Image (tube, rainbow, N blue to C red):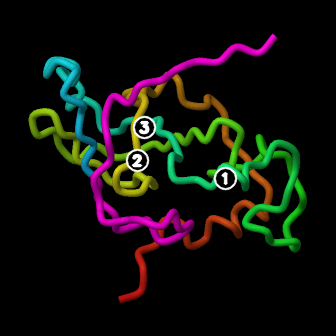
Amino acid sequence: MKASFAVTPVAYVKNERSGMTDDYWGSITSEIIITDDLPDECLDGIDSFSHLEIIFIFDKADQGKTLYGAGHSRGNTAWPKVGVFAQRKKDRPNHIGITTVKLISRKGRTLVVQGLDADNGTPVIDIKPVVKEFLPREETTQPAWMTELMQNYWKSPNP
């Protein structure tokens, strides 16, 4: 039996990006602005961490493009056809994204972060501090096609 869950945003992203493009996120600084219904103290102590995990909804994703099975990342047939859970694409069953970001500062109810690959206005559904003990204890591996796919992801756009 499938269960469904309702989630309510805890914050929204504010930055200069729109259009859900895949690459050139390297120079983007974002603000994560906590919603008015949460108390100020929800962020107390967060600035003692260097990095955060931001869980967000790809709310602007085209529901008609959702992948449930397997496909080629970015439609590139030179890369293997792999299941949706072997990809990090926005067109996934629950349209949930997660990214580890660097916390630059906290300004009241706003977090300033670097490395968030979410468009302006994106709803944030959770914020967690990065804790060393939850990181992999062994070296991570990935296929060569993923390394190729990611080569421009965190670069800054050409002027």
* Residue stretch in magenta: 1-30
Looking at the image, which residue is at 27% across and 43% down?
32
Looking at the image, which residue is at 66% across and 49% down?
63
Residue that badge 3 annotates: 54
Could you tell which of marks 1 and 3 lies nearer the N-terminus? 3
* Mark 3 or 2: the one toward you: 2
Q: As displayed, is residue 64 above or below residue 145?
A: above
**Image position, residue 73 (x, y; %):** 76, 61
Provide the secondary structure element on which disc 1 rests: loop
The quarter in which the C terminus is drawn is bottom left
Front position in the image: 9 or 83: 9
Residue that badge 1 annotates: 89
Looking at the image, which residue is at 80% across and 72% down?
76
Q: Is residue 136 left or right of residue 143?
A: left
* Mark 2 or 1: the one toward you: 2
Front position in the image: 115 or 30: 30
Q: Are marks 1 and 3 in contact (CB under 8 Å)?
A: no
Q: Residue furthest top?
A: 1
Residue that badge 2 annotates: 122
Tell me how far mark 2 sits from mark 1, CA to CA. 16 Å
Q: Is residue 51 magenta?
A: no
Provide the secondary structure element on which disc 3 rests: strand
The quarter in which the N terminus is drawn is top right
Tell me how far mark 1 sits from mark 3, CA to CA. 16 Å
Q: Is residue 2 magenta?
A: yes
**Image position, residue 157 (x, y; %):** 42, 79
Amino acid type at mark 2: Thr
